[in-house]
Amino acid sequence: MYGGGNVFEATKFDDVQTEDPAKLAEFEARIARGEKIEPTDWMPELYRKQLIRMIEQHAHSEIIGALPEGTWITRAPGFRRKLAQMAKVQDEVGHAQLLYSAAETLGKSREQMLTDLISGKSKYSNVFNYPAFTWADSNIISWLIDAGAIVNQMANAKGSYGPYSRALERICAEEAFHLKYGHDAVVHMATGSPKQREMIQAALNRWWPPIMTFFGPSDKMSTHTETLMRWKVKMASNDECRQQFLDMYVPKIWELGLTVPDPKLKKNMETGQWEYTEPDWDEFKRVINGDGPCNAERLAVRRTAEERGAWVRRALLNPKAKYVKPLA
Amino acid sequence: MNELAIKDLLYKLADDQLILGHRNSEWTGFGPILEEDIAFSSMAQDKIGHSLAFYTLLQELGEADPDTVAFTRNAEQFHNSQLVELPNGEYDFSLIRHFLYDNAEIIRFEMLSQSSYEPIAKVATKLKGEVKYHVLHANTWIKNLGASTEEAILRLQSALNEALPYALSMFEKSKYEQELIDAGVYGGEEAVKAEWLKRIQAVLEKTDLKLPDVESIEPKFGGRYGEHTEHLQLLLDEMAEVFKIDPTAEW
């Protein structure tokens, strides 16, 4: 589950100045023709760097994203929900495994990526720094966060890097099931007892502001990403993703008799664009930089898992073995 | 055949798997490597699915529906062995428990697939293929880690010593034991235990781990008769937390 957004550094023409112009031209021509770039192909350093960063953040988002929903597995009410919740969260961990492998093809080891996650050097999707207080929060995540992730990932699946693009195709197929599961769970809550309806509305109220920031800051305030768009690393702008998400899901939320907690939210029929209260981007920056309700807890869990499992990894590894870059 | 005896057998089978399934699921997002998160989660789904299959047979014998039976009883109404209710602890304990438990479970399933009580035989035949993979997983990891670093061997040996009294309690006899054996429903706990010892010994021999003298160990009996550690009720409370908010609601 990953919405992208706020993951790219500013790119300047200078960054590719040191590359061989002939190779760069051929690389760009291949991408323009719609060809995929494979691990052993030539690529600009900037392309490699940004892709590692992007795929790594995506992988981290999957394992950190497994935590807020994972805590609801033991508490999931009844066999039907429990089995689905378990399978869903397991899928997310499986996505992380796929994505770390895709990122490894670019030359960074899984262990190093996990070390950077724990040290706070690399980021993950900001929404997972918010808590899942109740079962209903977990349902909202399964439905709407996964929905947002699909919007972003369907776009990125058309990207230029072969291993990432193929991983995303598989991930999207699984996310589509999560979406159905999440929607079904929310429908049961929204059409259930007064207590259930109250729980699901409260969860939507809590999650709406983070959902609105899921795709990252507005394009007007984002760093320039033209080069990355041309290289098909970034496939859709943050605002395009957000508009598409609102188009697809606001009517479905309303259909259930739930209220979206934004009085300004409406579709402008002339422009075809949704209008909404501008999310609090200062809070977004503060949270992504570490000062959110759950940042410390999420990383502490991950750190504990890494530390407690270290003896297993030590036992499995021949100390003389060296890191080998896998084939995609 | 005495229906109470069948129900007792089914409760024992179902409760073991429900509780261990929940414990296994607690590794999701928390494993020593991602592949183990995924493996434990996968086994958790199988185990909980198996418990559902046995609770469904109980419902056919007139017991309440599976959700009610699984999520509203108290600890003293549970028939699982104490082995499965213990907290996960470190990965060494979870792996050893998984090894000890599934090597017994596969024998039960093999026996039950030959049961004279057809509904159980059908379910056991269908599900034993899944348990086979759980055993394969456990044995592979025990063989790998049990012959690796000194640290791993020490940890696993200590977990094995700690888990054994609880593991032996898996073979606590039902009050209907002889009746079930005579009717050809179930081969009985002594037969399971004898075969189990052979199988775990065969795996441990390929490692640097030593099986303590099991005859000198006093099993932590009681689980099959509703006596449990304090850990079970805590887990059951957690499992029922959402369900109890509105027991009449459809979730």
Image (cartoon, coloured by chain):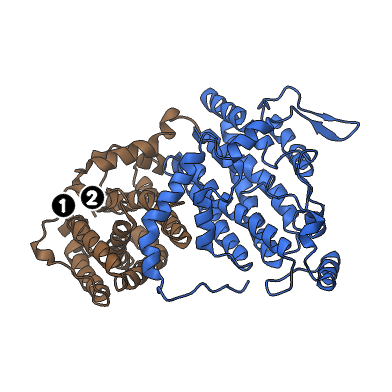
Hue used for the chain lettered B:
brown
Q: Quadrant of the N terminus of chain B?
A: bottom left
- Tell me the crowding category of disc 1: few under 14, some 14 to 19, or many 20 or more residues within 10 angstroms, Cα based: many
Q: Determine if residue A191 is in view.
A: no
Q: Nearer the viewer, residue A182 or A58?
A: A58
Residue at the spot x=89%, y=34% of the render? Answer: A271
In this rendering, the answer to whether A185 lies above or below B166 is above
In the rendered structure, which amino acid carries the disc numbered 1? Lys
Residue at the spot x=64%, y=60% of the render? Answer: A52
Residue at the spot x=70%, y=41% of the render? Answer: A216
Q: x, y percentage for residue A184?
A: 60, 41
In this rendering, the answer to whether B82 lies above or below A218 is below
In this rendering, the answer to whether A126 lies above or below A21 is above
**Residue A171: mark:** none
- Tell me the crowding category of disc 2: few under 14, some 14 to 19, or many 20 or more residues within 10 angstroms, Cα based: many
Residue at the spot x=13%, y=65% of the render? Answer: B214
Q: Which residue is mark 1?
A: B220
Q: Determine if residue A156 is in view.
A: yes
Hue used for the chain lettered A:
blue
- The chain letter under disc 1 is B
- The chain letter under disc 2 is B
**CB-based contact (under 8 Å), mark 2 and mark 1:** yes
Q: x, y percentage for residue A280?
A: 68, 30
In whole angstroms, how far apart are the C-alphas of marks 2 and 1? 7 Å
Q: x, y percentage for residue B162?
A: 20, 57
Q: Which residue is mark 2?
A: B82
| SS class, disc 2 | helix
In the rendered structure, which amino acid carries the disc numbered 2? Gln
Query: Which of pointers 2 and 1 lies earlier in the amino acid sequence?
Result: 2
